[in-house]
Image: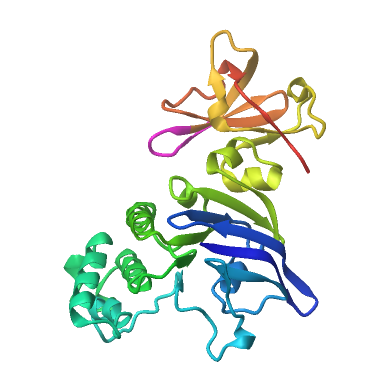
Amino acid sequence: MIELRNLSYEIGPLSILKNVSLTVGKGSILGLIGESGSGKSSLLKLAAGLNEPSSGEVLLDGQKIDPPSEKLIPGHPEIKIVTQHNSLFPNVTIRENVAYELRFFKKEYTEKRVKKLLQMTGIAHLADRYPREVSGGELQRALIAKSVADEPKVLLLDEPFSNLDRNIKRKINIALQKIIREENIACIFVTHEIADAFGMVDELVVLRKGKIIQKGKVEELYHHPKNFYVANLTGAGNFIKNSRLNKDEESGNLLIRPEDISLSDSGEFEGVIKRNIFLGPFYEVHLEWDGTELFFFSKEKLEEGAILKFDILKSVGLGA
């Protein structure tokens, strides 16, 4: 288990993180999301023992991790960090790169461990290739295998898949989850794409200007965001002000997710179809209603200019 306790981080007069506390248990994945400059990467470096906190502490299994000022070499051998940058040795094979992390172990164990990790990450067939001979997605899988080779207690992922396409991300995420669950690793996963967190993380934390704004299950943050910032980060939505829907909401700011707009011949509301945007499996349909443009998803292309009735199944009031 890794615990970040009341961490603050400052660079001169600039405050990067403010009194952040988080706990991640064994075999659990904590997602961290926020706009650029919110402090995500800085938090990971503090958790890894690579940066010096201005105040607060990091604990691993209840024991305080020494900050860089108290160590000859910053970091902790049981906490590994993976970024989107390739850190593999270019002139040795994928197998040898992973095995390097086990150079102080017995040969029999090393060979067995490397074989297992290459199979789990789906790159066993690439074991004897050099890093320059594999794709970006295969390279990231090799980096993951290398990072967990010596069985660390904590794995920190700093947007390692941001340059990969969706299908490759999905394959890597599945492989990564399997490793984390089976090996009982505590993991913090930083991303700026909410789609990467769906189906991946056990809990999601939203950072803004170095502070935790909201945390909980991904479903909870998606359906009940605290404010516009959280709502916008966690998925597509219609953000409106409309007295016909406000009811008792004090702010007057409402979120309507596209899936909460339902077409019905007996619908309460009426709008005009403005345009269709083809997105592969479905269309994103925009309609004008009461001076506001809303969008929703449809399996079929709808006639532009047509008047349609619809219901709003749910709207969420947002704070400032």
Q: Which residue appears farthest toward the bottom when viewing the image?
A: 72
In the rendering, at what x and y percent does residue 23 appear? Answer: 58, 58
Q: Position of residue 124 (x, y in %)?
A: 19, 66
* Residue at the (70%, 43%) spot, across then down: 228
Residue 127, picture quadrant = bottom left
Nearer to me, 29 or 164: 29
Residue found 25% across the figure and 76% down from its top: 94
Q: In the displayed structure, would residue 213 be above or below residue 296? A: below
The relative height of residue 148 versus residue 300 in the rendered view (above or below) is below
When asked about the image quadrant of residue 310, the answer is top right
**Can residue 223 be seen in the rendering of this structure?**
yes
Q: Is residue 129 visible?
A: no
Residue at 62 percent of width and 64 percent of height: 4
For the view shown, which residue lies furthest in the front direction? 62
Is residue 87 on the magenta stretch? no
Q: In the image shown, does 125 or 287 lie closer to the viewer?
A: 125
Quadrant location of the C terminus in the rendered image: top right
Looking at the image, residue 35 sits to the left or right of residue 318; the answer is left
Q: What is the image's colouring?
A: rainbow
In the picture shown, does residue 165 fall above or below 315?
Answer: below
Residue extent of the magenta highlight: 275-283
Mark count: 0
Q: Position of residue 297 (x, y in %)?
A: 49, 30
Comparing 286 with 58, the one in front is: 58
The residue under the point 73% across, 22% down is 245
Residue 46 is left or right of residue 20, and the answer is left
Direction from residue 160 to residue 33 in the image, left or right: right
Rendering quarter of residue 169: bottom left
User: What percent of the width, then of the height, locates residue 237?
Assistant: 60, 37
